[in-house]
Image (cartoon, helix red, strand yellow):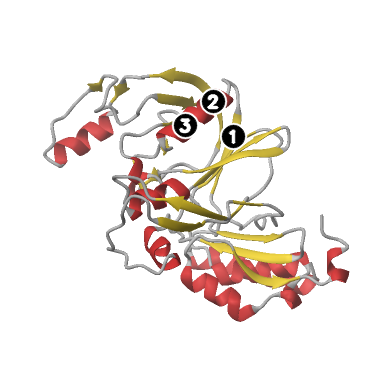
């Protein structure tokens, strides 16, 4: 990174402080450059009872984008046996030796074991008024069929909305925790199943991390008490993969942390020495769409690739 680039970044951060604007998530350090992508192209056969919102939630694709990918109206009626293309490449933000990484704007959970990505799952997260916290955590409990002890704050919300106020919800079809609960050392928060699968890949919870019932059943078997994890906030992801393609994935700044996607891409490209290789109109298109899918925005040449992991 050049001295001029460092000076420019320092001036921007100074301006944030002077103007009283919330510092962007990368204020102290830019997001890491990734070299890994999960997902891709899949053909899905529509099952009885399916609809686009449910399918999008299952695969981590916005339902309107899923409709566009398949050339059908968003409100189209789909039928059992119909074939849909699922295009859902997601950049893996960074690699862990072991543990769980959750990227909030991306609405994705990544599980690593022995330095390798084991699984990637779409998740449901806290609504903007009840944000999921950004922090490190540890799994401290594993419980099947947990009784939900309703927090006082949620009881108050039930009261305000004119609902029946419940202090406890026993296991069963009405329990929003579903069958599996991974308790975290972040007080009151957990990773759990849900009785509302269409809320996956959405921001609708009271801060907990929801997984599709099939996904949490799989993760529950793999994770042990003591597993470490980290929750990050990275709406802009940039990757250089083995064949030299540069991929960009952009999500909404859902919790309004003041992140400028265009500036973040410029800073990351300059810091990693490949500004010259980017197709800037393609970058602008991905930023404008903010549809959460990794797209090619450039390519490194053979000489550039010599220093790429």
Q: Report, in whole angstroms, how far the alpha carbon at label 2 lies from the one at label 1.
A: 8 Å
Q: Percent from the top left, x then y, of residue 215? A: 48, 35
Res 198 quadrant in image = top left
Indicate the secondary structure of the residue bearing disc 1. strand
Indicate the secondary structure of the residue bearing disc 2. strand
Indicate the secondary structure of the residue bearing disc 3. helix
For the residue pair 72 and 200, the one nearer the viewer reads as 72
Q: Residues within 10 Å of mark 2 (few under 14, many from 20)?
A: many
Instruction: Report the disc number at residue 216.
Output: 3
Please say whether residue 77 is visible from this viewpoint: yes
At a point 69% along the width and 55% down the height, the residue shown is 34
Position of 101 with respect to 98 (left or right) is: left
Q: Percent from the top left, x then y, of residue 117? A: 66, 40
Quick check: marks 2 and 1 in contact, CB under 8 Å?
A: yes
Q: Earlier in the sequence, mark 3 or mark 1?
A: 3
Dot in front, 2 or 3: 3
Instruction: Report the disc number at residue 229.
Output: 1
Q: Residues within 10 Å of mark 1 (few under 14, many from 20)?
A: many
Q: Residues within 10 Å of mark 3 (few under 14, many from 20)?
A: many
Q: Percent from the top left, x then y, of residue 281? A: 59, 81
Classify the position of the C terminus by image quarter: bottom right
Q: Report, in whole angstroms, how far the alpha carbon at label 3 lies from the one at label 1.
A: 16 Å
The residue beneath circle 2 is: 139
Position of 5 with respect to 254 (left or right) is: right
């Amino acid at each position: 990174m050049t001295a001029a680039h460092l000076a420019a970044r320092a001036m921007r951060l100074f301006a944030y402080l002077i103007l009283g604007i919330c510092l962007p998530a990368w204020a102290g350090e830019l997001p890491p450059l990734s070299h890994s992508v999960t997902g891709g192209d899949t053909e899905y056969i529509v099952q009885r009872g399916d609809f686009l919102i449910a399918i999008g939630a299952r695969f981590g694709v916005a339902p309107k984008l899923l409709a566009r990918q398949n050339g059908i109206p968003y409100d189209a009626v789909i039928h059992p046996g119909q074939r849909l293309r699922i295009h859902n490449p997601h950049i893996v933000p960074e690699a862990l030796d072991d543990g769980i990484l959750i990227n909030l704007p991306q609405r994705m959970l990544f599980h690593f074991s022995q330095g390798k990505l084991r699984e990637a799952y779409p998740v449901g997260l806290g609504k903007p008024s009840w944000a999921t916290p950004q922090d490190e955590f540890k799994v401290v409990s594993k419980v099947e069929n947990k009784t939900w002890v309703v927090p006082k704050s949620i009881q108050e919300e039930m009261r305000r909305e004119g609902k029946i106020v419940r202090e406890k919800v026993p296991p069963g079809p009405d329990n929003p925790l579903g069958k599996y609960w991974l308790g975290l050392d972040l007080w009151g928060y957990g990773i759990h199943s849900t009785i509302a699968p269409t809320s996956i890949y959405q921001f609708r919870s009271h801060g907990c991390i929801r997984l599709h019932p099939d996904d949490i059943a799989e993760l529950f078997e793999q994770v042990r008490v003591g597993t470490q994890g980290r929750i990050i906030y990275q709406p802009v992801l940039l990757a250089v993969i083995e064949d030299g393609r540069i991929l960009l994935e952009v999500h909404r700044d859902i919790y309004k942390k003041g992140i400028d996607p265009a500036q973040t891409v410029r800073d990351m490209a300059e810091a990693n020495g490949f500004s010259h290789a980017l197709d800037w109109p393609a970058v602008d298109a991905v930023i404008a769409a903010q549809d959460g899918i990794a797209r090619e925005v450039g390519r490194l040449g053979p000489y550039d690739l010599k220093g790429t992991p």
